[in-house]
Image: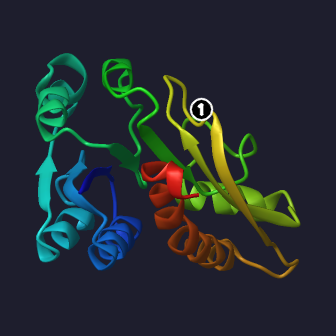
Amino acid sequence: MKRIIIFASGSGTNAENIIKYFHERKIAEVTHVFSNNLRAKVLKRAHALNVKALHFDKESFYDKNEVLNILKDAKPDIIILAGFLWMFPKKIIDAFPNKVINIHPALLPKYGGKGMYGHHVHEAVVRNKETETGITIHYVNEHYDEGAVIFQAKTAVEKDNSADDVAHAIHQLEYKHFPVVIEELLFPEEK
């Protein structure tokens, strides 16, 4: 059974979708959900789905090796960032080469970088009168949203769309594609 670990900072709807997807498929399992936000709803979602939920602080993530050591002990086949807002440390990326994946709510390289997440992205898309947007699933490196692109999916942006309308469309793309891309990365021989 392949092992998945998810990092998230907020609500955790993508994490919940991934957990349920692999629970039904029985080919991989989410063993842990990590969050840097003690009040993140993702921790409650993980508990409700019988997945270990762990909170950590900046010191244990960046300065000490506490998070890294837990990850090494857990032996994940893939680490998924699903709405995780902190820069991922190089020491963890180096320990798990080509195994740390992020999803971004725009068509990178557009609307990427520090501070470009969630509603900030959708508001920028509407403000700039984009005619399309989408999602990007990419490898994580030491820079925000600059790792190699694995997959992109697009959706149209209508003239009268609000940032909330765009967010809804993006969430639908995330729920549809993210678990499937994770499965393809875990089982490349079956493509």
Q: Which of 145 and 119 is in front in this view?
A: 145
Give percent across and percent down for residue 154: 76, 65
Q: Nearer the viewer, residue 122 or 80?
A: 80
Q: In this view, does 102 lie above or below 176?
A: above
Q: Position of 68 compared to 152: left or right?
A: left
| Amino acid type indicated by mark 1 | Gly
Q: Nearer the viewer, residue 6 or 180?
A: 180
Residue 115 visible in this rendered orientation of the protein:
no
Task: Tell me the quarter of the picture where residue 121 sits.
Answer: bottom right
Q: In this view, does 171 lie above or below 120?
A: below
Colouring scheme, one of rainbow, by chain, secondary structure, one colour: rainbow
The residue sitting at 32% across, 18% down in the picture is 91
Instruction: Please state, as top left, top right, bottom left or bottom right, where the N terminus lies in the image.
Output: bottom left
Give percent across and percent down for residue 174: 55, 68
Q: Position of 138 compared to 92: left or right?
A: right
Instruction: Please state, as top left, top right, bottom left or bottom right, where the C terminus lies in the image.
Output: bottom right
Q: Outermost residue toward the front?
A: 189
Give percent across and percent down for residue 52: 11, 58
Give percent across and percent down for residue 153: 71, 63
The residue sitting at 37% across, 74% down in the picture is 21
**Mark 1 lies on residue:** 147
The residue sitting at 34% across, 75% down in the picture is 25
As helix, strand or loop, the secondary structure at mark 1 comes to loop
Q: Position of 90 compared to 125: left or right?
A: left
Q: In this view, does 124 lie above or below 126?
A: above
The residue sitting at 52% across, 49% down in the picture is 188
Q: Position of 168 compared to 10: left or right?
A: right
Q: Nearer the viewer, residue 83 or 25?
A: 25
Task: Tell me the quarter of the picture where residue 76 sits.
Answer: top left
Task: Tell me the quarter of the picture where residue 134 sits.
Answer: bottom right
The local crowd at label 1, few if under 14, some if 14 to 19, many if 20 or more residues have their Cα within 10 Å, is some
Residue 32 visible in this rendered orientation of the protein:
yes
